Image: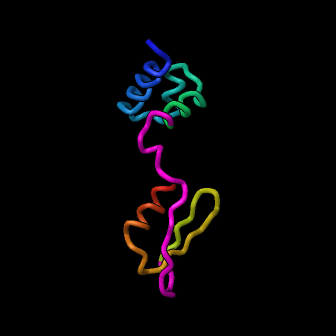
Amino acid sequence: MTREQYWEDMVAKFQATTLSQAAFCLEQDIKCHNFRYWLAKLTPSAQTPSFIKLAPFSKAIPVLVIEYPNGVKIHPASNTPLAELRALINLL
């Protein structure tokens, strides 16, 4: 079994559980930083962009505030397309 096959098996096991990453790593006796590296490498959703291009809109009153864990706040206009709002929220 190659290293990549080993980690593919670990990722599949993790995805079949309801455990947090930390609890899974503890249960499997593996280092969390190694697991997170391989999880990001092997999970297709990890390929999402970290920046989203937004088109300028007419001036509108913001009715929504998206606040990220690092303190960054975004005040999208009320006429922001839902697809762009979804992309912004998925960055969380």
Report how many numbered discs are placed on residues in the image.
0
Q: Is residue 73 rendered to the left or right of residue 91?
A: right
Residue drawn at x 41%, y 41% is 44
The image position of residue 59, as x and y in percent, is: 51, 87
Residue drawn at x 50%, y 37% is 40
Taking the view exactly as shown, the residue that stands out farthest to the right is 71
Q: Is residue 22 magenta?
A: no
Residue drawn at x 43%, y 20% is 5
Q: Please say if 52 is above or below 62.
A: above
The image position of residue 38, as x and y in percent, is: 51, 30
The image position of residue 54, as x and y in percent, is: 50, 70
Between 70 and 27, the residue placed more toward the observer is 70
Q: Please say if 15 is above or below 61.
A: above
Q: Is residue 47 magenta?
A: yes
The image position of residue 28, as x and y in percent, is: 49, 20
Q: Please say if 54 is above or below 56.
A: above
Q: Is residue 34 rendered to the left or right of residue 47?
A: right
Q: Please say if 52 is above or below 38.
A: below
Taking the view exactly as shown, the residue that stands out farthest to the top is 1
Q: Is residue 57 rendered to the left or right of residue 72?
A: left
Taking the view exactly as shown, the residue that stands out farthest to the left is 16
**Magenta extent:** 41-63
Please identify the quarter of the rendering in which residue 43 is found.
top left
Identify the main secondary structure in magenta. Answer: loop
Residue drawn at x 51%, y 62% is 52
Work out which quarter of the rendered image holds the N terminus and state it: top left
Please identify the quarter of the rendering in which residue 69 is found.
bottom right
